[in-house]
Image: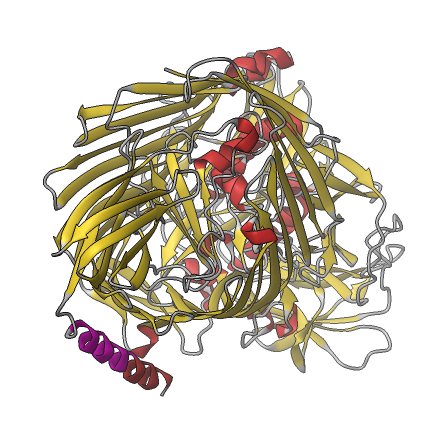
Amino acid sequence: MLRSNLLNLGSFRFLLAAATVSTVVGCQDPIDLELPEGTKRPIVNARITDEDSVTAEVYWTASYLTQAPNEPVSNAVLVLLEDGVAVDTLRPIANVPGRYKGTTVGTEGKSYRLRFWMPGDPKPWVSGPETVRRCPSIDSIYSEKRPREPFQLPGRYSLLHFTEPAGRGDQYRFKVWRNDTLENLPFNITFFDDQFNDGLSFNNVELPAVDFAGPDSVGTKYRVEISSISPGLLQFLTLLRQTTLQVGTPFDPAPGLVVGNLWREENPDEFALGYFYASGVSRASLVIQP
Amino acid sequence: MKYALFLAMFLGWMAGVQAQNSLGSGLATLSGTVKDASNGESLVNVAVAVECGGRKSSVLTNTYGYFSVTVPAGAAKVTLSSLGYEKQVTQVALTKSTNQVFKLKPSVVGLDEVTVGVERGVNTLKTTEISVAQISAKEVKKLPQLLGEADVLRAIRLLPGVSSVGEGANGFNVRGGNSDQNLILLDEAPVFNSSHLFGFFSIFNADAVRDAKLYKGGMPAIYGGRLSSVLDVRQREGNNQRWSSSGGVGLLSSRLLVEGPLVKDKASVVLAGRRSYFDVFLPLFNTPELDQTILYFYDFNGKINAQLSKKDRVYASFYNGRDKFGAADLFQFGWGNWTATTRWNRAVNDKMFFNATALYSDYTYLLGTPDNAETKFQLNSRIQNYVTTAAWTYFPSPKHTVDFGASNTYYIFSPGKITGAFDITLSQEWATEPAAYVSHTWKATNAFSVTSGLRYSAFGNLGPRTVTLYEPGGIFEDTTVVGTRSYARGEAIRWFTGLGGLEPRFSANYEISENASLKASYNRNRQYIHLISNNTSPTPVNVWRPAGAYIEPATANQVALGYVQKLARGAAVLTVETYYKDLQNIVDYKDGADLVFKDNIETELLSGQGRAYGLEVLLEKKTGKLNGWIAYTLSRTELQVDGPTRGTSVNNGEWYLANYNKLHDLNVVANYAPSKQWDLSATWSYQSGRPITYPDSRGEFEGIPYPIYANRNGGETPDTHRLDLAATFAFKGKNNRKPTLAFGVYNAYARRNPYSVFFRQDFTTREVQAYRLSVFGTAIPYVTYNFSF
């Protein structure tokens, strides 16, 4: 089974047991608190895949307690470098503040970086290199009907089969769209590496199929994307999930700074937030049938 | 240079020892053991004063109840005294060296005269011991309890210099040390997880424990392997006079102890067991998922000892405890310790005492699905210890005592093995830690005494193992891997030897007057194994990893100064101590470190340094109807991780507060015995808030808002305080066999003390709310019926 999911399952069970004990006598109360105001930093989330051209979203950080969205940055300059050579300048997307798009599609095996300038700041920022990696195709996608069981509601569950290529060192991320809407809460951040499944097939023979959704009713549409990601992005997603989900019990890890692969070109210690990544992708879709 | 100076000083003193010993003509040695007359158990720290030929010498019995004192030959007056026992004065014809067993009768006092069974401060004016606290099981049982369980560790935390990150936290912190820097020994066997129920209770069954001694500084040279403290817990030996049993029935746990003579006066056995039945009450919560929940802990203690001859005594003891959690066929989770100790004491001659110990310690945890689950999965982790020790104590004269010995600890680390749906094992690690020590206590004058010791330890991380190799530069990341190297079984991956393994120990005592003394100490400690945990408080699934190819041993240097003053004609003792400790090569963690089931753990670790300093005040009154203590600690603990890159530094390499730092820590303990039947007790604790990391801004990744924690431990939780109350009512019955009813309430005014503060965000509206997490959100009453036959 997937290492990440298994170990998260392990953590979940541990936390469940711990929570069983602590909830008997413990409690959580809302309190008022003033927080310090941190340094305002740029946020750039950008990606290029072997099927899609490069895209980016650019913001400023915001006060943690404000409900206002992060301020989008519309007049940043973003340049894509392929194997060290500038190949594309991203253009703002009309009527979508803070969003940019280029024309270059990623090529497997090539290395990409992003260089960018924030408005009024002549000093460039740069990303670390990201390589488009191979991504296995999805062998099949289907749904199955399951009865009610302890901790399982009855209904139709969606699964997929795919085969992890032989050779250690691969990392993957899953994204799922339900009825054309990306499932995009921290709990939906799903990723794993091939430490425990190198060269094996998630086909209910070698390993259980990947159970990605359910229960749902007939007619529900799903679109799934698997992307091959770098160890750096895996680390970033791990920290993102930890920081947003694993809070509130005595057994949670200490909060950490979620920093990606973006920094001031002349001073790597000065960091921006967000992540620029390159990946190969595989996609499949499903409509749950009676 | 400092090592050379120390060695020169030490050798000089050893020459003094020999010179003194050569003056032995006309002297006689009285040696022997002191025992409890009621049950035959050896008594520790009994003051033995021998007066003969106009010279008076006094010593304390050691951990095994043994003493040796040399005086001019003749008719000697021997006085034995110990708190809780009748003073005994005996005449001994000491015309030649004599070995004798002395038996002390427990004080026949009513509850209105009862004294707290604390040895702290009793002999502090006389000995070189500093930063040491001893607490007996009797005292622990008097304190208010959580859910009816008398708890040694909870009592220890009421002493100055000892704290924890919060209520219900696993482990404890001593003088700015992390919780893995405490060497916790149960009958000399190291215990790797001292908690039941995630930290709510300790594994030490107060019925089976004789006493616990905590060394916060000035550690004797026999101890090593941890930086900050030694908690030496000794199990009872068992009654060698008559068979008896005792126990208690509580709301959530019960316990039973049986003890008796195998051969009267010669051999005894004690067996104790305890089990919680928390799970029995879970159906009352009307939650179907809880109905099939397994949730309990148990532990067993046993000890047997036999006097083989006048000179030889052997012991064997064990501990086995485990916590078990589970839900139907969905998951199971358990952890526990096994320890086994065998020991041989021999009075080699009237001036030499020998102790040989062989022991085994084993900590395991299991996480996974039950055997009947549809999809099987089990994760097992384990650490095993095999320790052999030989220790001698030589008493050449009343002014000199020399301890020396050697030991070896062999470790097997099995950080993780997964079986079931697939089988995967993390590489095991093997290591050996040889050590030798010598220590000399010299009573230079009636007022001045000094203990100087030297410990030397080494550590070898051994194969078989395949070690990952990284680019030069000391940055261990997946991206800097350049290859691997395989090591054969027993082949040294890395040895830590050389001068770094020297651990000098020094402590001195100067009696300013009959009622006051000054103390000083220095100790250097080295620690070769680390508990890998980036949680606020360690959890049972954290694993220990050894120093090796990329992990360095940590070291600590501590100096302490102390002042002890007897007050009210000895009825009370005031102790004031101040300390400074520096720590090197301590382990810290990268942001978001993934520590679970990780082979190349070095890719997640950082290395740093620390400094801790503080002032401790302890005022204790040990006698009278009203007794107890007030403990106050003012302290600060800071860490620094300044690596070559931003990713290998914390807070840009600046000093930051440790998450267990507490500026003020105040504990008030009061026991009051208004009548022979009633015994009342209360504790009140106050601690200032501890450092915590707060977010200072918000980022966003593909539509997911997230907090930005740029300043580790830059915030502080609110202060905490708590009152606990207890009462014990003794029913009528024979002395020492009176059943009692103990009841009380933990957190009497239902204070919701913050364990931590965290934030919850609505990821759609981005609304953020801060929450205070309280482990104990209400007053928790308890009642326990205790019996003895």
Image location of residue B200, percent across then percent down: 54, 34
**Residue at figure coordinates x 54%, y 33% from the top left:** B113
Q: Is residue B29 above or below residue A7?
A: below
Image colouring:
secondary structure
State whether residue B184 appears in this view. yes
Residue at 21% x, 80% y is: B15
Q: Is residue B711 above or below residue B258?
A: below
Of residue B196 and residue A10, the one placed in the foreground of this image is B196
Magenta: predominant secondary structure element? helix
Q: How many marks?
A: 0
Question: Going by the image, does A104 lie left or right of B538?
Answer: right
The C terminus of chain B appears in which quarter of the rendering?
top left
- Which quadrant of the figure has residue B87? top left
Q: Residue at x 56, y 23 (%)?
A: B676
Report whether B361 appears left or right of A130.
left
Left or right for B703, reference A152: right
| B664 is within the stretch colored magenta | no
Instruction: Report the front residue among B618 and B449.
Output: B449
To which quarter of the image does residue B288 belong? top right
Residue B396 placed where, x, y %? 20, 66
- Give the position of the N terminus of chain B as an image quadrant: bottom left
**Residue B3 percent across, percent down from the top left:** 33, 82
Q: Which residues are magenta?
A: B10-21
Q: Residue at the location (15% across, 70% down)?
A: B24
Pinpoint residue B193: horizontal percent, then vertical percent. Answer: 42, 42
Above or below, B762 relative to A100: above
Front residue of B278/B483: it is: B278
Q: Is residue B582 visible?
A: no
Residue at the outermost left position: B309
For the residue pair A71 and A258, the one nearer the viewer reads as A258
